[in-house]
Structures are given as C-alpha cells and as structure tokens.
Amino acid sequence: MTSWFFKTLSPGGDSAKLSIFIFHRVLAKADPLLPSEPSAETFDWMVRFISRAFTVLPLSEAASRLRAGTLPPAAAAITFDDGYADNLLVAWPILKRYGIPGTFFIATSFLEGGRMWNDDVIEAFRCSQSHELDLSDLNLGFHRISDNSSRVKCYETVLDKLKYFEHQLRTETAREIARRSAVPDTSDLMMTRSQLCFLHESGAEIGGHTSTHPILQRLDDATALKEIESGKHELEALLKVPLRVFAYPNGVPGRDFSEKHANMACQVGFEAAVSTLQSCATSSSDLFQLPRFTPWDRTPLRFAIRSMLNLRRKS
C-alpha cells in the first residue's frame, strides 16, 4: 500500500519526481546535545520506510536518469554530508541491511582526525565545566549554561552568528572557543582515509563537498573554484575513481552559493550537484542545483506524511 501510494504521487519517466534525503550523522545512541541527529534505532525505521515506499538509487544514477527521463516511479536517493565516521560505523550497516545505496559527500580537510568548526563549538558547550561561557570578546555574546537544553540553545545561537564569519576567521574563532573548554585539537569524529576507502570499496558512492567546507558565496571566485576542484582531486586520487556528484556546503541557493558556483562544479567535471533547498527534483530541475529533503520527524507516521508533502512541494 505504501509503495503504491508513493508511486501514484511520483510517477516515473518524463513525469518523475526525485526525492533526495539528506543526513549528516547517525548516532549509535540518542544524544541530548544533538537532538536533530537520528539514532541508529530511528535511522533503522527511516530506512525501512524508505525502502518500502521508494526505489532508491545512487545519486549519480538518479540524476542521470532524471535527465534522460527514465527514472522509476517513487525514485529516491539517500545522501550524507561532511564525512562523519558514524556514516560508516552506524549508518552504512543499516543501509546494507535493507539493500539501499547511499551517497556520501566528503569535505577532505577533516579526514584523519579533523573536526569541523561547528563541532568545535558544540563540543565546547558539551565540555564546559562552567555555568557560563563568555564569548563577548569574540562578538558572540555571553551564555549561561544550566542543563542540556540550555547548552543546545546556546550553541545554536553561536553557530547562527559564526556561520557567516569570514572563512578563516570562522575556523580560528571556533577553535578558540573549543580551547576555552579544553576540547582536544583532534578527534575521531570524522572518517579516516582508510575508513573512507573501505566505505567506497563496500559499494557506497562518494561525492565532493569542497576541501574546507566554506560558504562559497563568501569567497572570491578563484578561491571558490580551488575549493571545489581540490576536494574533487583529493578524493579521486585516494579512491582511484572519478567523482560524479557534488554538494554545496550549507547549500542554500542564493545565500551560500550561486549560479557561478554551479558553473564551477560543471567546469571541474561533476555531472550533478545538490543544494539544501527543500523540495523534490523534476525534469525541469537544474542538475547542478538539485533540491533535497531533510527528514526531521521522529515518528514513522510524521515521517511518511512529510515525505508525501515533500513530493507535493513545488521547487
């Protein structure tokens, strides 16, 4: 019944709609400081539902068939951004259990012990032994911490402001915040190169996500092109295969990247690229600005309803 219903909403061929699910992390156990990231238990029923409702394809194949007008009914792709180790250790075994492919976008600078700027901030609020964190000298305010809920609220406030700092300043500021809470400089949060190779060899599709995960719109054109191209070349050298798909960091069209960055992704040899615009892709979609869907819901019924509503959303 579920499969029939979604195939009715999303017929194949020239009238096809492509649902692209976006994840970042899948946690072994629920973490109160990461309420938007699914646990393994939650991800399991999400994937079970997707496997029953959709025909899931690697993103490169889905994009190619979208262009050719040969997508099957209820077509979908599952994608992961950034390169977290739990993508391999937690998410990938679940995908394999249901026979579902996945596409993983990797920011290369954080492989082998790196940590992304946003995780520096999150871990600072997690590790802080004080009831307050004064970041006024960094133009990021004064924050009182009383419980996990306040930690989440405070770090979200900081991230919203810090996100659009100049790229290098953002990195340096996040690292300084982490040091103030005695967060180590390195971690095992992101995949190692050997883990990434294993993921690729196990059948996962790997895509580009720049080198250092900048907001491309805030870089000069030469630096933006270098970020897109260097991330691609680093991964191709490591994996010994050409990369076909790309994800824009942060990914909001017009704010985080623009048409010129889509042209850059095409120029360096990618065949398709994805944004974080909430919608589904159709035959009229730009292959270098494909929309994606973020599955926030934590109950199967709400997840199914949101997946249905996404198919009815106009891109």
Image (cartoon, rainbow, N blue to C red):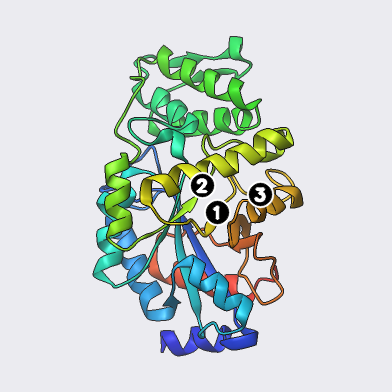
Could you tell me which residue is drawn at 37 percent across and 27 percent down? Answer: 126
Residue 185 location in percent, x, y?
36, 20
Residue linked to disc 3 = 252
Q: Is 32 in front, or is 275?
A: 275
Residue linked to disc 1 = 246
- Amino acid type at circle 3 is Val
Residue 53 location in percent, x, y?
42, 80
Could you tell me which residue is drawn at 62 percent across and 49 percent down? Answer: 251
Q: Which mark is residue 256?
A: none
For the C terminus, the quadrant is bottom right
Relative placement, left or right, of 37 versus 96 is: right
- The vertical placement of 165 against 92, above or below, is above
The answer to whether residue 197 is seen in the rendering is yes
Label 2 CA crowd tier, 10 Å (few <14, some 14–19, many 20+): many
Q: Earlier in the sequence, mark 3 or mark 2?
A: 2
Residue linked to disc 2 = 232
